[in-house]
Amino acid sequence: MIHTENLSKTYRMGDVEVQALRDVNLEIQDGEFIAIIGPSGSGKSTLLNIIGCLDKPTSGAVFIEDIDTASLSENELAEIRREKIGFIFQQYNLVHTLNAIENVALPMFFAGVKREMRLKRAEELLVKVELGDRMYHKPAELSGGEQQRVAIARALSNDPEIIIGDEPTGNVDTEAGNLIMDILDGLNRDGKMIIVVTHDAEIAARAGRTKRMRDGRVLD
């Protein structure tokens, strides 16, 4: 479903150019659970952002279902993100003025789903991530692990085929991290493609395949 061809990304910081990705070639199959591991600054998050259509490469290509996303307009990229990709961020990125069910329902609002239907689905998703008793709590009233599970439910709101997690267990304790990984395992068994970036070897070991990065390159 996803493959990259000679993917490179260069950032300019003043007079200095930083090459975040260097000729990355990677293929990820339908229904695969892959972990991308490496030290800070290795290019993991940059690769994830480009695969997830949040950023564009300086050169090279990213294909999702044979569509070269590097050639798409911002509106076309937004459509792919809305319909095909669910994001889980290390910092949760929840709207703090909304409760859990409203946070999960929000992407469905932008997809044009009617209010009754989006609230019903949001409730079902919160039950799925074991937060049926916390759905009317705001983020400040939830633990880090609970907030991340709300973020997972939100990522599933438009039933995407691809789930992308950028250090999804990075801000939670071990118990919460294991529960989050159990949820991701279950989603993978349901046929979702899971792509996780992590620096934690134990978390990476739970994926079906691991790729290592260093200095902007995929090593193996």
Image: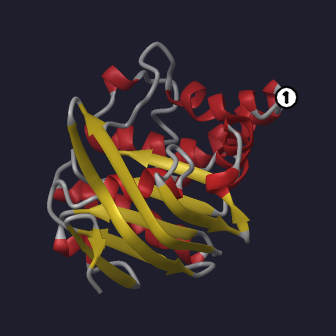
Q: Badge 1: few (under 14), some or many (20 or more) residues near its Cα, within 10 Å?
A: few
Residue of label 1 = 114
On the image, which quarter does residue 115 sit in?
top right
Q: Position of residue 166 (x, y in %)?
A: 36, 53
Name the side, left or right, on which 100 lies relative to 144: right
- The residue closer to the viewer here, 84 or 46, is 46
- The residue closer to the viewer here, 56 or 114, is 56
* Dot 1 amino acid type: Lys
Q: How many marks?
A: 1
- The residue closer to the viewer here, 106 or 19, is 19
Residue 213's place in the image compared with 94, above or below, is below
Which image quarter holds the N terminus? bottom right
The local secondary structure at tag 1 comes to loop
Name the side, left or right, on which 71 lies relative to 21: right
Examine the rendering and report whether any part of residue 211 can be seen: yes
Q: Position of residue 181 (x, y in %)?
A: 36, 65
Q: Residue at x 51, y 18 (%)?
A: 98
Which image quarter holds the C terminus? bottom left
